[in-house]
Structures are given as structure tokens and as C-alpha cells.
Image: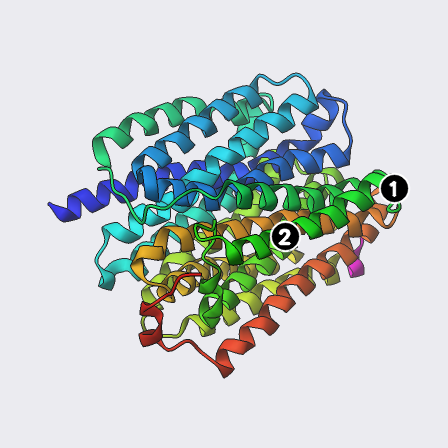
Amino acid sequence: MNKWRNGKIMAISCLGLFMAMLDTLIVGVALPQIELKLQTDMVHLEWVMNAYTLMFAVGMIPFSLLAERYGRRNGFVLGLILFTGGSLLAGLSESILLLIVARGIQGIGAAAILPISLTLIYTAFPEEKRALAVGIWSGISGLGLTIGPLIGGIILDYFSWEMIFLVNVPIGVITILLCFFWIAESYGIKQRFDIVGLLLLTTGLFGIVYALITGNLLTWGHLSIVIGAIGGVILLIAFLIWESRCSYSLITLRLFRYPSFSVTNFVGFWMSAGIFGSIFVLTLFLQQVQGYSPFEAGVREMLWTTMTMIAAPVAGVFMNKYRVRSILMVGLLLQAIALCSFGFVINQLGPIFSFGYLAPGMIGAGIGMGLCFTGIQHGVLEGIPDQYTGEGSGVSNAIRELGGVFGIAIAGVVFHRHGLVTSGQQFADALVPTVYVCAGMIGLACISLLYLYVKPLPKQASHQVGGQ
């Protein structure tokens, strides 16, 4: 009976998770059509991507805590409602600003879906089966993230870009209904909600990301850019000070005193930055320079997708045999090497060449992503007691999504340093340093991970976490 109940929780949680992750990158293949239809530019296209990931990242921590207090199923259903409503609005958008707003609403919904789905699964399974359960969750997460371009390509071959969003509506409605039949309500630690901390965090992050993205449109010395960057940093510092003194803080900062928790989150941030930034520019390269249709580009990126889908659950199986840090290091190195190989190939062969030259790198990147997805989630949760699972999941996934936001923004900064791109060769010249910078971000994650080889967290020390 428990197996059947757990299976239903796994199925419905992963269905919602798949939709949320799918829409992170599915819009990438539609960017050329959106650019033409809505008469916009690359800066606004970056906001179409980042409006989702920014709200996704910022919303995960508060939604995780609210779900612990008011019910995990309630929080999960609320996320599905927001995501479905945002999808409908995006599909009906006739202006770039409305589309950006709709993507933000989608992101808010996804911010509830992702961490709560992990909490539902993690608490449903006994301890000896959690590594495998997290591996399956990570595999679905990676599948949704990387299969987005393929699904988007298939849809765009038969319909307009609006259908990419409208297809979520019936699936979302069905998933919402199943929640009430398949998931029982559960609760975690109840505490007051830190609205001041939330405002400081969201406005600080928005200021920094706004400065990074709009710096490509305006001059970097522009007053709004300077105010956004400096103001964002000041607000984030104020957030940390407030959190350290608030008795009902948004984040339990003491969790970061544990090396496994803090280092793994740092790894997740820079890994996501490198991967999101590179995928953003590579997807445009395959279509706008190499001439592939959205479907053709998606099929080729399936190499990446398939390897991620296979590697993530396999990593979960071996997680109890090999240390998390070793699995993470292998995954990071594979991704960094893959991105460097993209830059080397494009630099040597120019803008036009056979896709076969990119295939080995995509296979390596996919395997590396799968290993890291599972390793990061398991590494974060095994270092904290069960009562902090919801908060730990929210913090970890928020940090990882924020990495994606910064990665896309930084990739845009590096890409635009070459000025106006009007030819395939100019695109290639701008792309090469961009993927090298993305590889460097993953290199930062590798360097930070070395700390766990020097000072790993003893498992017996992970069962007590004090207050602030």
C-alpha cells in the first residue's frame, strides 16, 4: 500500500516538476519567431528568459517556508495554478512587455512547484530509498530542462510560438485535479513569515540582474545601471544583516556553517551559471547561424538531454557507494571540458561545420549535468536534519536558479562586447569567448569543491542545527 502511495506522490510531483523545468529553456527555440513577431531586440529576449528564472529563483525560499506552515499540498497546488495561469497569459500575449510579465508569473508558480515537489518525494520515501528517489527526481528535472528545445521545435514545426505556452494549460489543470486525489496534506516546521527579508532579497537581486542585462542596451556608466548594481549589493548586505538578527528569519543562515551545505550550494550556483549561459547562446547559434529549424536544433540537442536523463538516476544508485564530492567533481569536469570543446571547434572551423563536431561535447555535458543534478540535491539534503528539508530544498534550488539568471546575463555581457552582430562569422567570433567564460564559471565550482576533499562534513554532525 505504501509503495502505491509513494508511487502516486512521485508521479504527480514529477509531472509538475517536468512542466516547470521544461519552460525554463523551451522558449529558447522560439526566440527568433518572437523577435520577428513582436518586433523586439536581444535585450528584451534575455528578459523573456530571465523574467522566468529570476522569479523562479527568488520565490523558491518563501514558497518552501509557506508550504511548511500552511501545507505542502496547498503550496504545490498554488504553484500549479500560477504556472498554468501564467502559461495562458503568455500564449495570449501580443506585446513583448506582456509576455515578460506572463513569464514572471510562470516563474512564480514554478518557484512553488520545484522545491515542494522535492520535499514531497524526500519525505515520502524511507531513508534507504531516498538517494534513488532524489536521483529519479533529478533525472526528471534534467530531462525537462534539456528536452525543452526539442519539444519546442516539434511544436513550432506545426504551430506558432504561442502554442509552446498554451499546451501547458490542459496539463496543468489535470495535474491540479490529481493532487487532491493522490497527495495527502502534510506540514513541516511552522514559523512567522519574514516579509522584510523577502523584500530585501527580491529587490536586491532584481537590482543586480537589471544592471547586468540592461548594461548591454545602455552604457555601463548610465545612472540607472549604477543605481541598480550598487543598490542591489547594498540591499543584499542589508538582507544578510537582517537575517542574522531576525528571530523568524527567511533563511536559517546557520545551515551555511556546514561545509557540505555551503560548498554544494556554491557549486550549484556556478554550474547553473555556466550551463544556462552557454545553452542560451548555443541555441541561437544552431538556428540563426547554422540554419537549423527549431525542430532540427532540438533533435540535435537531444544528445545533451538523453545523457542527462540517463546519468541522473544512475548517480542516485551509486550515491551510497561513492562520496557526493567525487560524483560532483566528475560531473563538473565533464561540463567544463565540453564547453571548452565548443569554443575550440567554433574557433577552428568558423560558423559553418557538421554538427558531428559538437556531438562529443554535448554527450559529455549531458552526462556531467546528470551527475551534478543528483549530486547537488543529495549533497545539500544529507547535510541537514529532516525538519530542514523543505527550507534546504528551497534555498538550494533558489541558488541554482539564480546562477542561471546570472549566467545568462553574464553571457549576454560577454557576447555584446563585440558590438553589433550582423553575420555568421561575427556571431561565431562573439560566441567563442562567451562559452569559454561559461566554462570558467564551472571551473570556479570545481575549485570550491576541493574544500570538501580537505574538510568533508562528518555525517554524524549533521543532525543538529541550532537557531540563529
- The residue sitting at 43% across, 39% down in the picture is 112
Using the image, determine if residue 329 lies above or below residue 120. Answer: below
Q: Is residue 348 magenta?
A: yes
- Whole-percent x and y of residue 422? 87, 39
Q: Residues within 10 Å of mark 1 (few under 14, many from 20)?
A: few
Q: Which amino acid does label 1 sit on?
A: His
Answer whether residue 355 is visible to the viewer in this image.
no
Foreground mark, 2 or 1? 2
- The residue sitting at 89% across, 46% down in the picture is 221
Q: What stretch is highlighted in magenta?
A: 347-351
Q: Main secondary structure of the magenta part?
A: helix
Dividing the picture into quadrants, the one containing residue 451 is: bottom right
**Which residue, given by chain and number where applicable, does mark 2 sit on?**
238
Quadrant of the frame with the C terminus: bottom left
- Whole-percent x and y of residue 159? 56, 21
Tell whether label 1 touches label 2 (CB within 8 Å): no
